[in-house]
Structures are given as structure tokens and as C-alpha cells.
């Protein structure tokens, strides 16, 4: 198996955290997808990370797809609760966190455009979505510390990426209990080992 990652991609980080939590070690190739490296585009013509090529030569793209495959292929330790209702709730939070990652990335990419080409309306719309996302996490996410499933992984990576890329977004002031949980999650070995370079 071969796993293509970028050290700064939050989607790749989410997968790295899951692999570390499961105790799995795949052959990893760090790439810059913006450079459209040939090795990556052979596996994934979209030049996106993460991309996993299985031993059978099947290229899996998208962190959610790869996480689903990991959970079915390496079911222990589980990243989803065994109870169906609890698993549904965990997936709902994981989906919310994924949307927050996407909104943050959209802001980052928009800010990289020339100032005269940037859409202030798009940036403000994504910021408002992130504010609602944090409020929803603070209300709906149970912040358990006796397990670390896909909901916790997603929330921890999304909030860490918000801190990393949009430090001016003072979400911790509005959600102190979520911030305390995030501090706990950030201290986990999987989050420490997968932190982006500063």
C-alpha cells in the first residue's frame, strides 16, 4: 500500500490521526499536490491528498472514503461506536467537522488570490458558517474523553486547522468547554505526531 499525503493538508492530517489511533503504518509519500507530482497524478488524476493505493492497485481518494475503507479493513480498534444510534451521531459530527474544514480551506484559498480578485462576500459567508459550526459543535458534540472516534478526530483536526490558518477567529471565547476539550485532544500522541510544520 502507498499513501500520498501533504504535511499541511487538514484532510491528510485527519487520515494520519486515524492511522496513528489504529496503530497502522503505511508506506507514506509526502507530496505537494499544488506541484501536480507525476507519482500522485498517476494514482489520482485530481492531484489531491490524501490518496491511498491499495495492494490490489486500487486508488482511493478523499479522506472520508479512505477512512471508511480503513474501518472495514482494519476494524480494531474501532473508530465508530458499535451502537448504531451512537455511530450515526458520531458520523453527524464528523460530517459537520468535514464541512468546517472545507470552509476554512475555501477562505485560505480565496485569500491567496490577488486582493482585487478576492470575494469579501464569500469570505464573510464562510466565516459565518464557521461561527455556526463551532456553536453547533459546542452544543451537539459530547466531548467524551474515554474514547476518540471519527467525531473526535474530525472535531480536533477542524478546530486545530482553524487555529492554524485563521488565528483571528477567536472561537475559544465563545465555546470555552469545547476549547478545554480541544486542549485535551491536542495533547494526544496522534495529534502531536501529525501536527503541520510551523
Image (cartoon, helix red, strand yellow):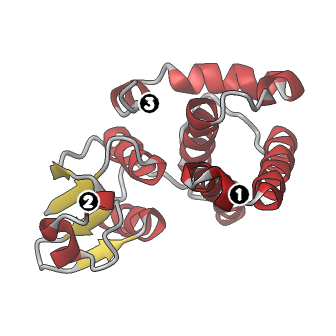
Count residues near mark 2 (Cα–Cα under 10 Å), then give few for <14, some for 14-19, many for 20+: few
Distance of label 1 from label 3 (alpha carbons): 19 Å
Q: Is residue 118 above or below residue 187?
A: below
Locate the C terminus by quadrant.
top left
Does any portion of residue 86 appear in the rendered image? no
Q: Is residue 95 above or below residue 181?
A: below
Does any portion of residue 47 appear in the rendered image? yes
Q: Residue 79 in the image: state x and y as whole percent.
A: 48, 51
**Residue wearing tag 1:** 96
Locate the N terminus by quadrant.
bottom left
Q: Residue 193 in the image: state x and y as whole percent.
A: 33, 28
**Residue wearing tag 3:** 191
Count residues near mark 3 (Cα–Cα under 10 Å), then give few for <14, some for 14-19, many for 20+: many
- Residue at 20%, 80% (x, y): give it: 58
- Residue at 68%, 64% (x, y): give it: 88
Foreground: disc 2 or disc 1: 2
Q: Is residue 35 above or below residue 140?
A: below
Q: Is residue 161 left or right of residue 34?
A: right
Report if the CB atoms under discs 1 and 3 are less than 8 Å apart. Answer: no
Q: Indicate which disc, 3 or 2, sits on the residue closer to the N terminus.
A: 2
**Residue wearing tag 2:** 35
Report if the CB atoms under discs 3 and 2 are less than 8 Å apart. Answer: no
Q: Secondary structure at mark 2?
A: helix
Q: Secondary structure at mark 1?
A: helix
Query: Residue 123 falls in which quadrant of the image?
Result: bottom right
Amino acid at each position: 500500500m502507498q499513501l500520498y499525503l501533504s504535511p499541511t493538508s487538514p484532510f491528510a492530517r485527519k487520515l494520519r490521526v486515524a492511522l496513528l489511533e489504529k496503530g497502522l503504518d503505511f508506506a507514506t509519500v509526502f507530496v505537494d499536490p499544488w506541484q501536480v507530482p507525476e507519482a500522485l497524478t498517476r494514482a489520482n488524476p485530481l492531484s489531491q491528498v490524501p490518496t491511498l493505493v491499495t495492494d490490489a492497485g486500487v486508488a482511493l481518494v478523499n479522506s472520508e472514503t479512505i477512512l471508511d475503507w480503513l474501518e472495514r479493513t482494519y476494524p480494531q480498534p474501532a473508530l465508530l461506536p458499535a451502537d448504531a444510534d451512537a455511530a450515526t451521531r458520531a458520523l453527524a459530527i464528523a460530517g459537520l467537522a468535514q464541512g468546517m474544514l472545507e470552509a476554512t480551506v475555501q477562505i485560505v484559498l480565496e485569500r491567496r488570490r490577488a486582493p482585487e480578485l478576492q470575494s469579501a462576500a464569500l469570505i464573510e459567508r464562510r466565516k459565518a458558517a464557521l461561527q455556526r459550526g463551532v456553536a453547533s459543535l459546542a452544543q451537539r458534540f459530547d466531548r467524551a474523553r474515554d474514547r476518540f472516534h471519527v467525531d473526535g478526530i474530525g472535531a480536533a483536526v477542524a478546530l486545530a486547522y482553524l487555529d492554524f490558518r485563521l488565528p483571528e477567529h477567536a472561537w475559544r471565547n465563545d465555546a470555552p468547554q469545547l476549547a478545554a476539550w480541544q486542549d485535551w485532544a491536542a495533547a494526544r500522541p496522534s495529534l502531536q505526531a501529525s501536527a503541520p510544520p510551523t
